């Protein structure tokens, strides 16, 4: 089985700029960790150094599960990763505190991915518990 480190460059949909923040800097990481009161995992930061958020390549846009979900019998969709930054009209992990409050989510999470409902009437959020 291939290691994630060997595949992480293949994760991103490089044909789309949707959701992509400016290149990740050490200063942006410090700001995010301070705002979110977390230490972000090195594996996530390494991924965001390749591309700071955006759409996942269509061939990699699902996460396997060992049991059925509301989406499918064996996976959940995973088609975006939020980057770290303040690009206008683009969601970022820095928006987590506001979004957690707005949607009444548990307060001990950092949002790392989002998905619009096909009806356009809501959001489904993937969360990463504080590390």
Image (cartoon, rainbow, N blue to C red):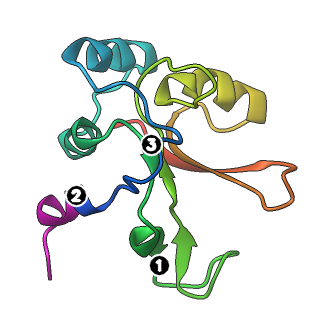
x 28%, y 26%: residue? 24
Give the answer, above or below, for where 100 lies relative to 72: above
Report crowding for label 3: few under 14, some 14 to 19, many 20 or more residues within 10 A (C-alpha).
Answer: few
Q: Mark 3 falls on what kind of element?
A: strand
Q: Magenta includes 5?
A: yes
Q: Outermost residue, bottom direction?
A: 73
**Label 2 close to label 3 by CB (< 8 Å):** no
Q: For marks 3 and 1, give the CA distance.
A: 18 Å
Assign the N terminus to one quadrant of the image: bottom left
Q: Which quarter of the picture shows residue 3?
A: bottom left
The first of marks 3 and 1 along the sequence is 1
Nearest the eye: 113 or 65 = 113
x 38%, y 19%: residue? 32
Nearest the eye: 2 or 19 = 19
Report crowding for label 1: few under 14, some 14 to 19, many 20 or more residues within 10 A (C-alpha).
Answer: few
Nearest the eye: 34 or 117 = 117
Q: Mark 1 falls on what kind of element?
A: loop
The first of marks 2 and 3 along the sequence is 2
Q: Which mark is residue 118?
A: none
Q: For marks 2 and 3, give the CA distance.
A: 22 Å
Assign the C terminus to one quadrant of the image: top left
Q: Which residue is mark 3?
A: 129
Q: Which residue is mark 2?
A: 8
Task: Give the extent of the magenta segment.
Answer: 1-7
Q: Which residue is mark 1?
A: 65
Give residue 63's position: percent from left, percent from top: 45, 71
Nearest the eye: 9 or 109 = 9
């Amino acid at each position: 089985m291939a290691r994630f480190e060997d595949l992480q460059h293949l994760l991103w949909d490089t044909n789309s700029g949707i959701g992509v923040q400016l290149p990740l800097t050490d200063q942006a990481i410090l700001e995010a960790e301070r705002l979110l009161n977390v230490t972000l995992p090195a594996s996530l930061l390494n991924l965001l150094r390749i591309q700071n958020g955006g759409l996942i390549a269509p061939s990699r846009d699902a996460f396997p599960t060992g049991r059925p979900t509301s989406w499918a019998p064996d996976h959940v969709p995973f088609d975006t990763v939020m980057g770290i930054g303040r690009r206008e009209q683009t969601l970022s992990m820095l928006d987590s505190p506001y979004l957690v409050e707005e949607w009444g989510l548990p307060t001990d999470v950092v949002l790392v991915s989002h998905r619009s409902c096909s009806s356009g009437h809501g959001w489904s959020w993937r969360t990463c518990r504080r590390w």
